[in-house]
Image (tube, rainbow, N blue to C red):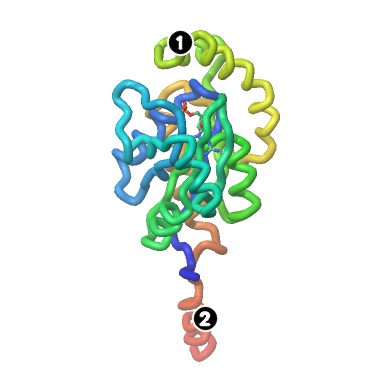
Amino acid sequence: MIEPKGLLVVISGPSGGGKTTLWRLMVERYPDVVFSVSATTRQPRAGEVDGRDYFFYTKSRFQEEVANNTFLEWACVYGNYYGTIASYVDNLLAAGKNVLLDIDTQGARQIKAKRPEGIFVYIVPPSYEELVARITRRGSEDLEAVARRLQAVPDELKELGNYDYLIVNDDPEKAQQQLRCIMLAEALRVKRQDTSWLENFAREAKKA
Ligand code: 5GP
């Protein structure tokens, strides 16, 4: 197996927390950051592009891929299936890219079990009112779907303890800076760096 080099960064949080805006900003700003495009059985929203936002699958195609072990994780979220394509993520990591996954808390648990080296970041809007305003403003969900997303919030918040970082997203610019800081700091962890050259360094110093 090829040793993964890039960072695997998971972002989760209630619908309307601004995760989509955040990953789009990150990908736009930083050439080392790429988004893990998931597969879903949800219908595309206006403006969503197949292969950029999601790979839009039929239910039967999704089931086939589950049977083929294509997914690193998958879950049913708000009545639709979503899954992370393992080869997609692994190829990018092996190429040294920092890969951002926007997935729900069930998926994050699965990733954490398989990839404990992942970095887990929880994103919340600054208030409940703002969350409602964002989901409603988007206009992409019918009333029933909006209600379903809101009803899921208490359970989603219970998962916060499984995450390493919390970003209160009251401003997308600030949120992307904070996420960038997390990534830069994580990349500097001793365990993530190749320190073999320091052995030579120590040897040379001994001779002095
Ligand atoms: P949306 O339908 O608003 O794009 O996404 C709904 C929820 O599904 C969001 O919380 C998002 O993080 C989550 N999601 C998107 N892709 C995946 C995935 O591949 N796996 C899992 N488990 N959740 C996902």
List x then y, in percent, for residue 47: 29, 24
In the image as oriented, which residue stretches furthest toward the bottom? Answer: 207
Relative side of 92 to 116, left or right = left
**Which residue does the image show at 52% across and 62% down from the upper left?**
192
Compared to 17, does 7 lie above or below? below
In the image as oriented, which residue stretches furthest toward the front? Answer: 60
Mark 1 highlights which residue? 136
Task: Assess whether mark 1 and mark 2 are in contact (beta carbons under 8 angstroms).
Answer: no
Amino acid carrying label 1: it is: Thr
Quarter where residue 51 is shown: top left
Amino acid carrying label 2: it is: Glu
Q: How many numbered marks have been drawn onto this rendered protein structure?
A: 2
Mark 2 highlights which residue? 199
For marks 2 and 1, give the one nearer the viewer: 1
**Which residue does the image show at 46% across and 10% down from the upper left?**
136
Give the structural element (helix, strand or loop) at label 1.
helix
Compared to 124, does 73 lie above or below? below
Residues at marks 2 and 1, CA–CA distance in whole angstroms: 57 Å
**Which residue does the image show at 46% across and 33% down from the upper left?**
41
**Which residue does the image show at 46% across and 39% down from the upper left?**
179
List x then y, in percent, for residue 16: 49, 21
| Neighbours of disc 2 within 10 Å: few (<14), some (14-19), many (20+) | few
Depth order, front residue of 77/24:
77
List x then y, in percent, for residue 131: 52, 15
Compared to 87, does 40 lie above or below? above
Depth order, front residue of 74/105:
74
Q: Is residue 6 visible?
A: no
